[in-house]
Image: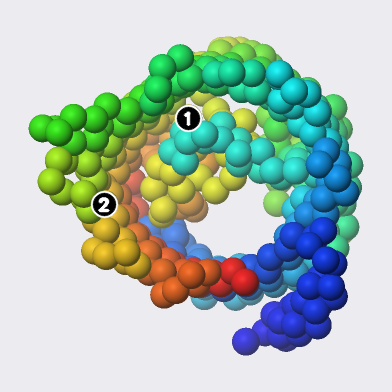
Amino acid sequence: MRNPLTACLIAGILFTPALRAADGALDYRFELSVERAELDGLSLGDDPDIERLDEEDYEIELDVEYQVDDRLYFFFTGALIDESESVEPRGEDEEVSGLERKRIGVGLLFGDEVGSELNLGRMEFESASDWWIWWDEELDAVRLESEYRSLEGMLAFAKEQARESTDADFIDPEFDGVGRVIASLAWEFAPGHSLGWYYLDQDDDSSRFAVGEFEDAERIDEEDADLTWTGVSYFGGFESEAVGVIDIEWHYARVSGDETVYEFDDPDPATGLAEVVERERGDVRGSAHGLLLGWAPAGLDDWRFVLGRAVGSGDGNPDDARDKAYRQNGLQGDAEAFGELYQPELSNIEVDVIGVEWRLDERVALALRRYDYRQRKLADEMRDVALEVDPDGASRDLGSELDLVLTITAYEGLELVVTAAEFDAGKAYSVYPDDSASYINFELVYEF
């Protein structure tokens, strides 16, 4: 086990008694997680130097909340992390180790008839759905949340103020200079049925470049985008003695605005600078929609069947100044919602999913899902997938994936999740020697 993780454990043991002496004014928890993942077939046999991706993550997290009175409180979540990522057989590529700030700030509860909460600092933004993720990210922001009868609203202004961890020398280029207005409204119009409205306006004030200019390779941000996302969601549940329980998610989203995309040459090994070789600006007009159905049959309480489809628009004419391809907003966190291995962004793609979930007993659950992928419009690249190769642009058939997830809760606070996946490449990847890739991930989490 790595030395930073040992230091984390010692820090947790030493710090615990001090927290316990706070006479109940302080709520806290520790969470220790260890994760190991391996993706084989990263280039589908195209490049012998990048055949396998290995990832190791060690983390111990401290979550603290201090309640001053019934209205005012302070919160902090920090994590000591040790993360490494290597591409084999090339060798070690990247390692991150240090203290990561996740949440820190102040909260104020107020209002009687309209219950409200105001937060200032770094906080987490979460979506109502684990499948269609609007946002799953920690952001520096000021946020107001209010609740009145069956209505819940949120309004936030976000812009990164500092680097994410002690290991980083600067703010993540994808977040640096980006201001966001985030809003949502949820209405439970009937028991078990709700509608949601979402809004995100993004104004990117990061540096602009001209062709021929140079940028530090570590600070490269390939997109400057001033975009607006809007969307609606419906969540519903139906239950009968004869059929069982059926739950429905339906989502629709649009994105519009303008963006500038840069292409950089390989960085100079001596200076670490990369040259801008191409710059394209265009108007963005895209849309996406998705439907997910879940069914727990009557008499089979431990079983649940899933059927779904998600579609992100594509651009049929890449040579004009309008890009009709949808793209997610970059706040969706891990993109595993549409496949643990392929991990596509919802852009120029059709994803069909069918699955079954089985709870063997109170401590063991098994989930099996199959994903089928097709391009919406023929293209010789995908916006964001895990594989390090592009499709050939001659077929829309991207392939299929089978995911198996085993969750074991040994006892309260200790959980092991094992994920295995196999991706079978479609005709769009037929130019590559290998026709499949595999993925295995072990994650152990202990909360105390």
Relative to 441, 118 lies left or right: right
- Measured in 3D between alpha carbons, the distance from the residue under mark 2 to the one under mark 1, in whole angstroms, is 27 Å
Please give the label number shown on residue 332: none
Q: Is residue 249 above or below residue 382?
A: above
Question: Given the image, on which type of amino acid does mark 2 rest?
Answer: Glu
Crowding near the residue tagged with mark 2, few <14, some 14–19, many ≥20 C-alpha atoms within 10 Å: many
Helix, strand or loop for disc 2: strand
Q: Quadrant of the N terminus?
A: bottom right
Give 156 or 70, whichever is nearer the viewer: 70
Crowding near the residue tagged with mark 1, few <14, some 14–19, many ≥20 C-alpha atoms within 10 Å: many
Please give the label number shown on residue 357: 2
Relative to 252, 21 lies left or right: right
Residue 91 percent location from the top left of the image: 60, 75
Q: Quadrant of the C terminus?
A: bottom right
Helix, strand or loop for disc 1: loop
Displayed quadrant of residue 271 = bottom right
Q: Residue at x 56, y 72 (%)?
A: 446
| Nearest to viewer (mark 2 / mark 1) | 2
Give 278 or 389, whichever is nearer the viewer: 389
Q: Residue at x 79, y 72 (%)?
A: 20
